Amino acid sequence: MGEHPIWVAVLVNRIFGKLAVAVLAALHIKPENPDFPIPNHIAMEFLVFLVAIVFFLWLKRRISADRPGAAQQCMEALLTNSLGLGVEDMLEDFVGHGGERHMAMLGSIGIFVLFCNLISIIPTLESPTAQVSVPLGCAIVVFLYYHTSGVRRLGVGSYLAHFTGPEVPLPIPFNWVVSFIIVLIEIVSHLARLLSLTVRLWVNMFVSELLYVIFLGLTLALVIFAGHANPAWYTLGVLPLVGPMIFILLHIFVGLVQAFVFTILPVIYVGGAVAEEH
């Protein structure tokens, strides 16, 4: 049984559904639900992109050096702040000279993840990052980007050389064996980064949304059950709205933390990839 399409997915499928079916057919891929070939998480990504475009176009018109508004100050805090946790601050710390060239890419990924994490606090919407394919896609982009950055900075030969580790003063056959082992360890460690980025974001957002939905349902069911026993209990009908608020706040906290993690780790990976000495 496929997932139930939310209203955003219904709207996106009405607009792009036929095109999606044609593209999938050309790739010899059969959609799980031919009536709704674009699943919820893809539709929500479309919405996130649209919200981000509208927001930043609106913010661009309100940018002021003399009287910055609250939205401008919040976005500037994502770039640099007194705690040194902005994208620009972290790039300066971990990448150093030339780190600003990575700000657009890594900052965009961090903001995209942030918007995806927090959009589900709006009723009837879902976090795309609660679906494993979205964190995996973001992790693949990060994985390819920091390797590409290392190759651009050091060259193919010099970048690949650091996978063999430092030179070991051993006879040639043993030196080759040690280098081969280090290469295997490096490959596994880099693949582990891909897995770590994916699973950390996906599991945290999935569990956060699940907790909210479960406790909302339990609180609502409790009020309805008590109301059947004594109609006076219906006066507590506000509980299903107030009760889960703690989980909404928890979801916001988890979303912010995971967006930060998905920003600082790519910064560290890029810093390691472009470093002159490994």
Image (cartoon, rainbow, N blue to C red):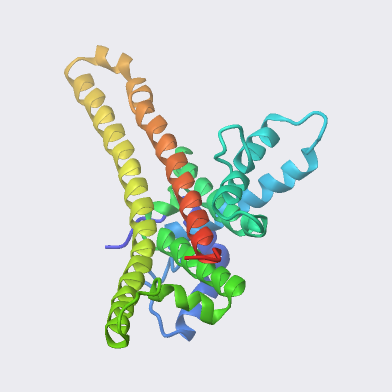
Does residue 265 appear to the left or right of 148 in the view shown?
Answer: left
Determine the residue positioned at 27% across, 83% down.
174
Q: Position of residue 185 (x, y in %)?
A: 31, 71
Towards the viewer: 67 or 192: 192
Picture quadrant of residue 255:
top left
Residue that extends furthest to the right in the rendered view of this protein:
66
Does residue 125 appear to the left or right of 171 in the view shown?
Answer: right
Determine the residue positioned at 54% across, 67% down.
145
Towards the viewer: 114 or 124: 114
Picture quadrant of residue 216:
top left
If the image is split into quadrants, where does the N terminus sit? bottom left
Towards the viewer: 123 or 14: 123
Residue that extends furthest to the top in the rendered view of this protein:
232
Residue that extends furthest to the left in the rendered view of this protein:
229
The reply to whether residue 249 is visible in this rendering is yes
Does residue 213 appear to the left or right of 151 in the view shown?
Answer: left
Q: Position of residue 146 (x, y in %)?
A: 52, 66
Q: Relative to 40, is 75 above or below?
A: above
How many numbered callouts? 0
Q: Position of residue 82 (x, y in %)?
A: 60, 32
Determine the residue positioned at 44% across, 53% down.
128
Q: Position of residue 267 (x, y in %)?
A: 52, 55
Determine the residue positioned at 30% across, 45% down.
207
The reply to whether residue 10 is visible in this rendering is no
Towards the viewer: 228 or 162: 162
